Structures are given as structure tokens and as C-alpha cells.
Image (cartoon, helix red, strand yellow):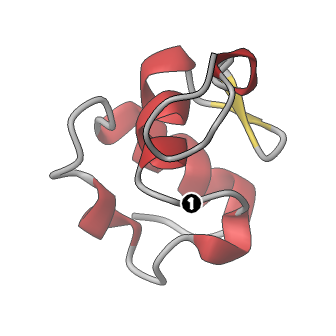
């Protein structure tokens, strides 16, 4: 089954582009059109308003990127 963004539900596991951020955050990012770390904004704090993406997910993404939020 595909959602409105065309992403298969099976793709919405707990890992986003190799970073284990949890299923809600991964699903939220995929639904918003982010597919890879390179797709994310330079300032990861811009992701916080997205329902399902919290401070922990932003921190984990920043650590994977080698930056701090």
C-alpha cells in the first residue's frame, strides 16, 4: 500500500538513510519528501515542526552528519 507521497509503508521502518531515528520520525521525513541525509536542511532544527520528528531524532541525525543541532 502506498501513502499520498507515493512511499511504500514497508519503507517507513525505524531507520532513515542508515540512521536509527525511529519509525515515527522516519515516516514523517519520508512523507515530507526527504529521502536521504543530503535532502535534509542544513539546520536540522527546521525539522522539529514536523509531527513525528522530535529532538532525539534531530540529535541522532546531527550526530550522523557530524554536526550538533
Q: How many numbered marks does the figure carry?
A: 1
**Looking at the rendering, in which quadrant would you find the C terminus?**
bottom left
Measured as percent of width and height from the top left, residue 33 is found at 51, 59
Q: Is residue 52 left or right of residue 20?
A: left
Specify few, some or many for label 1: CA neighbours under 10 Å numbering under 14, 14-19, or 20 or more.
some
Q: Quadrant for residue 22, please give it.
A: top right
Measured as percent of width and height from the top left, residue 14 is found at 65, 18
Q: Quadrant for residue 52, please give it.
A: top left
Q: Secondary structure at mark 1?
A: loop
Q: Is residue 47 left or right of residue 11?
A: left
Closest to the observer, 27 or 69: 27
Measured as percent of width and height from the top left, residue 30 is found at 54, 45
Closest to the observer, 25 or 32: 32
Q: What residue do we see at 40% from left, 33% from top?
A: 56
Q: Is residue 11 left or right of residue 3?
A: right
Q: What residue do we see at 46% from left, 78% from top?
A: 41
Q: What residue do we see at 68% from left, 57% from top?
A: 35
The residue tagged 1 is 34
Closest to the observer, 66 or 22: 22
The answer to whether 16 is drawn above or below residue 63 in the figure is above
The residue furthest left is 49
**Looking at the rendering, in which quadrant would you find the N terminus?**
top right
Amino acid at each position: 500500500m502506498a501513502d499520498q507521497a507515493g512511499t511504500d509503508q514497508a519503507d517507513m521502518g525505524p531507520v532513515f538513510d542508515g540512521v536509527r531515528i525511529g519509525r515515527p520520525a522516519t515516516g514523517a521525513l519520508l512523507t515530507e519528501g526527504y529521502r536521504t541525509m543530503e535532502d535534509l536542511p542544513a539546520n536540522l532544527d527546521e525539522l522539529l515542526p514536523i509531527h513525528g520528528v522530535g529532538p532525539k531524532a534531530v540529535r541522532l541525525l546531527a550526530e550522523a552528519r557530524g554536526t550538533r543541532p
